[in-house]
Amino acid sequence: MDVHNGAQLRSRLLATSRPLAELDVERAVGSWLYCRDGRRVLDGSSGVLCVNVGHNSPKVAARIAGQLSRAAFAGPAIARPYVQMELVERLCRAVGRPDDHVAFTTSGTTGVEVALSIARNIARVRGGESRQQILAADLSYHGNSAFTLAIAGSQARRPRAADSFGLAPAFPAPYPPSHTGGPRGDHVCDATCADEVAQAIDSRGHENVAAVIFEPVNGTTGGAFVPPDGYLRRLAEICRERGVVLVHDEVLTGLWRAGKPLASDHWEGASPDICILSKGLGAGYTSVAAVLIAPELATILKADGADPLPAMGTMAATPLQAATCLGVLDELDSLDAKVFDERCHRLGERLGALTKFSSVTDVRGVGFLYGVELSRGVQWQFLEKVESRGVLFYPFRYGTGEGFIVAPPLTSTDADLDFLVDTVRDTLAELGSSRPA
């Protein structure tokens, strides 16, 4: 393809863009992108926070090749879904929910849509036909459909009021500075912030609310905010007391991105009724999502009066997709748990030390998911400079806050992580001096 023709074709591709030069990537291996001009760039945010097991995984490639020679497509409603059933068993054991029932679908967005449809079905059978409302936080992201954008609180992606069907976020997310008041008006968030979820349910009448959906650790919308200790447990209690289905959106955080099989595993008593996985399951190799439903609730879906299951999509976990996901799980199983834990701890410590730079206002996160918040107006200058030094990051912005996400592949080596942190440190040093000791 000549340069002129390539530019013309690029102008016809409708896609969001960032205000930086595009990388002309020729191939990718492990944590690294190799460009046509000879440069190599560390993928510091795992693509769009999905390439969890690295690029060009031999285990994933082997699974794909093996299945491709057998059968790429066979709908589970038509042919016996052997590979999909194997994936159900492996996946549920991997995340510590061994008896869950699973619905596979085609993306994180459709996974959320299916999960909320199922939650409504369960809530109506248990509590009556009026249970239909879905409540979400005002700093959240649950997918890119008109419905999921309308209920959630992604300030950058939220549709116009006229396009939101009268829907809106229902309660404050428990993160300062987003949560400006707090339950006591002191700008400090703790477990009692969950009482505002109770207020949101009660103000609508619990008999009208089907589900609450929440990200156990915030993703890119606010930059890896972590809820205060006790919040998720209290949230689960509030939902159980009112017969409301609790849905955890772990599209981004699931499968060890937050340092554990599920982000909610960091807190006792936080387990949801329904859990959605996607990015870490397909790992950039295929588009897929899994909706995990607690067994005691899954039986309700077969009760008299329950609606039929929602359509999962033509390409919902075909044998080829399921085999790809099994390859991802193979790769995750091969990680040394002790070494991975040590790397999570060391990455957090080293990123936390970046607050000595005057342009860094906060560092937060857990596992292999961190948000580094920068002084206003520094974001794109930093991203341009750090990319020229060989590390690519994903930006975030909310309200007056902005920064970048640090989320390298879980398979990154010590040398990869050292290069990442050292490059960030050197770039920040170039931007401005350290704070006084």
Image: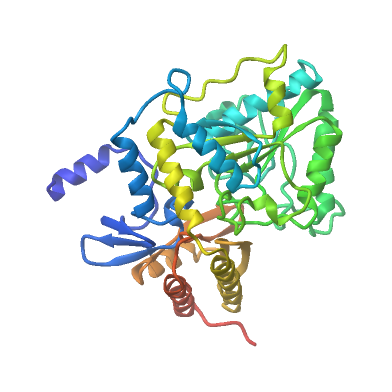
Q: Quadrant of residue 117?
A: top right
Q: Quadrant of residue 352?
A: bottom right
Please state, as top left, top right, bottom left or bottom right, where the C terminus lies in the image. bottom right
Q: Quadrant of residue 368?
A: bottom right
Q: Residue at x 46, y 27 (%)?
A: 81
> Which one is in front, 175 or 406?
406
- Up/down of 401 relative to 102, above or below: below
Q: Residue at x 62, y 61 (%)?
A: 365
Apparent side of residue 160 relative to residue 233 in the rendered image (left or right): left
> Which one is in front, 148 or 249?
249
Indicate the position of residue 134 as horizontal and vertical percent values. Answer: 70, 30
Q: How is the image coloured?
A: rainbow
Apparent side of residue 178 relative to residue 407 in the rendered image (left or right): right
Indicate the position of residue 251 as horizontal and vertical percent values. Answer: 56, 43
Q: Residue furthest left?
A: 2
| One can see residue 281 in this view | yes
> Which one is in front, 280 or 67?
67
- Up/down of 31 relative to 359, above or below: above
Q: Residue at x 69, y 34 (%)?
A: 294
Apparent side of residue 206 relative to residue 354 in the rendered image (left or right): right
Marks counted in the figure total: 0
Q: Residue furthest top?
A: 305
| One can see residue 149 in this view | no
Indicate the position of residue 158 as horizontal and vertical percent values. Answer: 57, 38
Indicate the position of residue 208 as horizontal and vertical percent values. Answer: 79, 23
- Up/down of 264 relative to 146, above or below: below
